[in-house]
Amino acid sequence: MTSSILELNKPAPLLEVEDLRVSFFNGTRVTDAVRGVSFTLGKEKLAIVGESGSGKSTVGRALLRLHPGSARITAKTLRFADTNLLEVSEATMRQVRGKRMSMIMQDPKYSLNPVVCVGDQIAEAYLAHHKVSRAEAKERVMTMLNVVRIRQPERVYGLYPHEVSGGQGQRIMIAMMLITGPELVIADEPTSALDVSVRLQVLAMLDDLVEERGLGLIFISHDINLVRSFCDRVLVMYAGRVVESIAACDLDNAQHPYTRGLLNALPDIAHRRATLPVMVRDPAWLDG
């Protein structure tokens, strides 16, 4: 009886993904990039980790329907809050994309328009979903630049992407994605281009924003050590599949040999080794 009451009071997940598959077609060649991925997301920080090419970013882009027409996306369930992402029209998807669900790209150098000042780019993201004057949009941008801890926001507003540092550029990207007040943020390697000290500052800022705004966060990374301390749960992907789902605090107890291999390959100052082990992949991981 008690368990039934708890189930009834349990909040519905923000995102439901069941048996997601993404394939790319190039002539007669078919590449199955994502194969049967399933997970749910609440108001939490969920990491998706794995090597380059494992399908991490492909999953994130599929949720926002950012893949080209040559991609085929199928799933038993692909639901964001009250929206069936498989069935909505592109017009409706444009209202979801950016306003309710945003994606922070990994390198601002290639994601920002080089010939438009950064403040106007953030304002454009806000104006795309809110009918306000440009003066009001600019005020909103200035507030957001303060939120993401940009010093001298008035000066930075008028700078071009090549005039800001890597840390500033990443903060600007985060401001652009959060200014619309999304419910879900997908962060694709948001700290990979930053040095260690700036990386920690950006992670702390993201952590505060998720906590204060009650967001769901999907954090895509190849750095399993980083997500161990930053995220709540971890999905480990290999060759387009999720091979293990585990609480971040339990990573040391991971069971799958691929996850164990990733952990064993990490250098450890406290336990020096002459050489780091090389992962031996089992063909059975592709299917089982």
Image: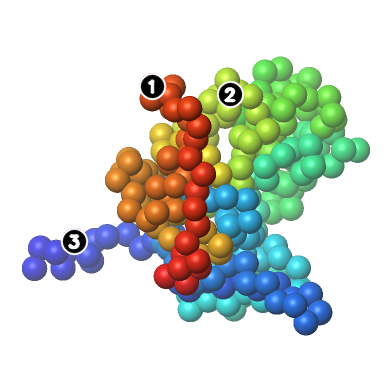
Which residue, given by chain and number where applicable, does mark 2 sit on? 196
Q: Kindly identify the residue that appears in the image at 70 percent across and 62 percent down.
A: 66
Q: Amino acid at mark 3?
A: Leu
- Residue 210's x, y, as percent? 47, 40
Name the kind of residue labelled 1 in the image.
Answer: Ala
Residue at 72 percent of width and 39 percent of height: 107
Give the quarter of the image for residue 62: bottom right
Q: Residue furthest left?
A: 1
Q: Residue at x 58, y 23 (%)?
A: 196
**In which quadrant will I find the C terminus?**
bottom left
| Circle 3 residues within 10 Å: few <14, some 14–19, many ≥20 | few
**Nearer the camera: disc 1 or disc 3:** 1
- Locate residue 232 relative to residue 160 in the image: left or right: left
Residue position marked by numbered label 3 in the rendering: 6
**Is the residue 268 above or below the residue 190 in the image?**
above
Residue beneath disc 1: 270
- Depth check: 175 or 162 in front? 162
Q: Earlier in the sequence, mark 2 or mark 3?
A: 3
Q: What is the CA distance from the residue labelled 1 to the residue labelled 2?
A: 19 Å
Counting from the top left corner in percent of width and height, residue 199 is at 58, 27
Mark 1 vs mark 3: which is more N-terminal?
3
Task: Identify the element where label 3 is drawn.
Answer: helix
Of discs 1 and 2, which sits in the foreground? Answer: 1
**Disc 2 and disc 3: Cα gap in Å?**
42 Å
Q: Residue at x 78, y 25 (%)?
A: 164
Q: Name the amino acid type tagged 2.
A: Val
Mark 2: few/some/many CA within 10 Å (<14, 14-19, 20+)? few
